[in-house]
Amino acid sequence: MKLIDWRKERQLTLADMASMIGLSGSNPARDLQRFETGERRPPATVVQAIFDATNGEVTPQDMHDCRLGWERQNLAAAE
């Protein structure tokens, strides 16, 4: 399951979800948004936190597939 779908089904904001998985920094909601779209690859600790927070409904494979989809769409267009 895609993280964005899981989050929206539960009516959580980006900020809510970022807090739930322990993201910190200058803009954790924006960081989460980039992970959801696949624009950025989350660190392994964040992938584990997402897996735990979603009770396994969003898997590391789901996160990988999201990133791979983003790369296929955006990096192929740059060539």
Image (spheres, grey):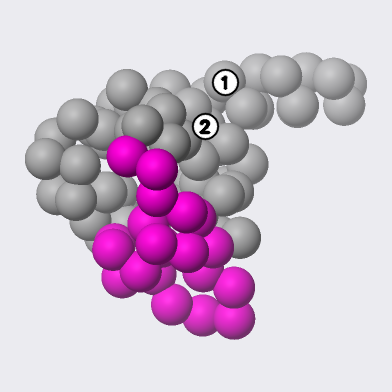
- The foreground one among 12 and 56 is 12
User: Which residue lies under the disc numbered 2?
Assistant: 67
Q: Residue at x 64, y 27 (%)?
A: 71
Q: Which residue is mark 1?
A: 69
- Classify residue 58 by image quadrant: top left
Is 57 a magenta residue?
Answer: no
SS at mark 1? Answer: helix
Q: Is residue 8 above or below residue 50?
A: above
30 to 50, vertically: above or below: below
Q: Are marks 1 and 2 in contact (CB under 8 Å)?
A: yes
Q: What x and y, as percent, mark residue 57?
A: 19, 30
Q: Residue at x 58, y 36 (%)?
A: 37
Total count of labels: 2
- Which amino acid, by three-letter code, is at mark 2? Arg
Question: In the rendered structure, which amino acid carries the disc numbered 1?
Answer: Gly
The quadrant of the rendering that contains the N terminus is top left
* Bounds of the magenta segment: 10-29
Q: Nearer the viewer, residue 12 or 65?
A: 12
Is residue 11 highlighted in magenta? yes
Left or right position of 29 against 78: left
In the rendered view of the protein, which quadrant contains the C terminus? top right
- Residue 73 shown left or right of residue 52 in the figure: right
**Position in image of residue 64 (x %, y %):** 40, 30
Residue at image coords 50%, 40%: 36
